[in-house]
Image (cartoon, grey):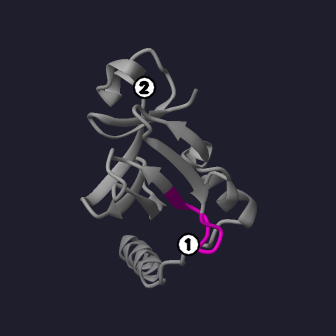
Amino acid sequence: MKKTLFILSTLVLLSACDKEPQATKPQPASVQATLVPEILPTDKWVGQWIGVEGLNLTVSKDESIGRGHYLLTMQYGLDADAAGTFKGVATEDGISFTRPDGPQLLRAGDGTTTGLKWLSDKKDCLVVNTGEGYCRQ
């Protein structure tokens, strides 16, 4: 009797191990929509930003490419050739883009993080590097 019970329990265990794992089902669209935010944090940056000594930045969505892509029109230096429009892509840290002086990252900050005393009292700013920042008026 014990021997029969042992054989039956062994067969039950082996048959359970023989089954293939079930593939995970994709989540319904309503659940997937909640996982990806409808508005990216960088979408709130769209508009005009003012720097010092004539520097400025305009962030606009690049609708031709799609979500998370931007056009950055900027005067980033005092010389006339330090201006242009650059394609940017949203990242976890901000908007990455490349201009003639190399790859850059536009990130949120305040007047203090710009490193510019004329902007130090501002709260809503975008910063490329210390000494290059743009704030909302």
Question: In which quarter of the view is residue 136 placed?
Answer: top right
Looking at marks 1 and 2 on the same chain, the residue that comes earlier in the sequence is marked by: 1
Q: Quadrant of the N terminus?
A: bottom left
Q: Which residues are magenta?
A: 62-72
Q: Quadrant of the C terminus?
A: top right
Main SS category, magenta section: loop
Which x, y percent locates residue 28?
A: 71, 66
| Residue 24, label in figure | 1
Compared to residue 45, the image places residue 112 above or below, namely: above
Which x, y percent locates residue 104?
A: 31, 54
Question: In which quarter of the view is residue 23 placed?
Answer: bottom right
User: Considering the numbered disc 2 on the image, is that residue within a helix, a strand or a loop?
Assistant: loop
Going 49% across and 56% down the picture, which residue do you hit? 72
Q: Which residue is mark 2?
A: 110
User: Considering the numbered disc 1 on the image, is that residue within a helix, a strand or a loop?
Assistant: loop
Q: Amino acid at mark 1?
A: Thr
**So how many labels did they put on this image?**
2
Going 65% across and 68% down the picture, which residue do you hit? 63
Residue 82 in the magenta stretch? The answer is no
Q: Point out the frontmost of discs 1 and 2.
A: 2
